[in-house]
Amino acid sequence: MFKKILFPTDFTEMSRQAMDYILQLKQNGLKEVVVLHVIDQRTLDKIEPFILSDRFQQIKSKIYQETRDLLQATEKELRSGGVNVKVVTRSGHPAQEILKLEEEEDVSGVVMGSHDSIGLQKLFVGSVAEAVVHQSKRPVLVVKH
């Protein structure tokens, strides 16, 4: 059923729990996992005007380096579980980038963690998982605590 899964991760505990589910899917025929981390460009755009250009570039470089390090660790763990892994980093709006990559990679489904957003946070920020569930053309497994 699920031969190729898209796993968007933000490296939080909820993403970690979603990865545990992915490793269980290996027993049911899972062959490949596409791991995606989206650096939220909206956040970078908001802070850039308030930081000197050189300092902003240092911060941005550090974010990208930390992302690479965390993705390598995620890739290593999934490979040790016996699945093939492709790693992708994008910059943009997380939900939009997840949906784009879902199509580009022609995945069987999406497995992702979700945070419990409440109140004003959900009203203003919205939920990436919620947007993906509503707009995805593939099955989406959302792991919540």
Image (tube, rainbow, N blue to C red):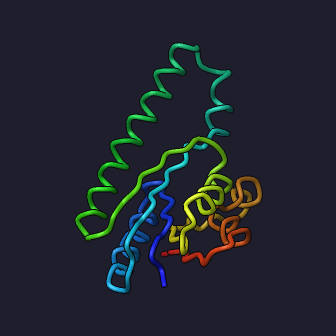
Measuring from the top left, give residue 59's x and y in whole percent.
48, 26
* Label tally: 0
50 or 142: nearer the viewer = 142
> Where is residue 12, by image quadrant?
bottom left
Q: Residue at x 72, y 63 (%)?
A: 119
Determine the residue located farthest toward the left in the rendered image: 80
Measuring from the top left, give residue 19's x and y in whole percent.
39, 68
117 or 37: nearer the viewer = 37
Above-or-below relation of 78 to 30 = above
Q: Is residue 64 left or right of residue 45?
A: left
Above-or-below relation of 8 to 107 = above
> Where is residue 49, by image quadrant?
top right
Q: Is residue 88 left or right of residue 76?
A: right
Q: Residue at x 73, y 68 (%)?
A: 135
Measuring from the top left, give residue 143's x and y in whole percent.
50, 75
Q: Is residue 113 left or right of residue 31?
A: right
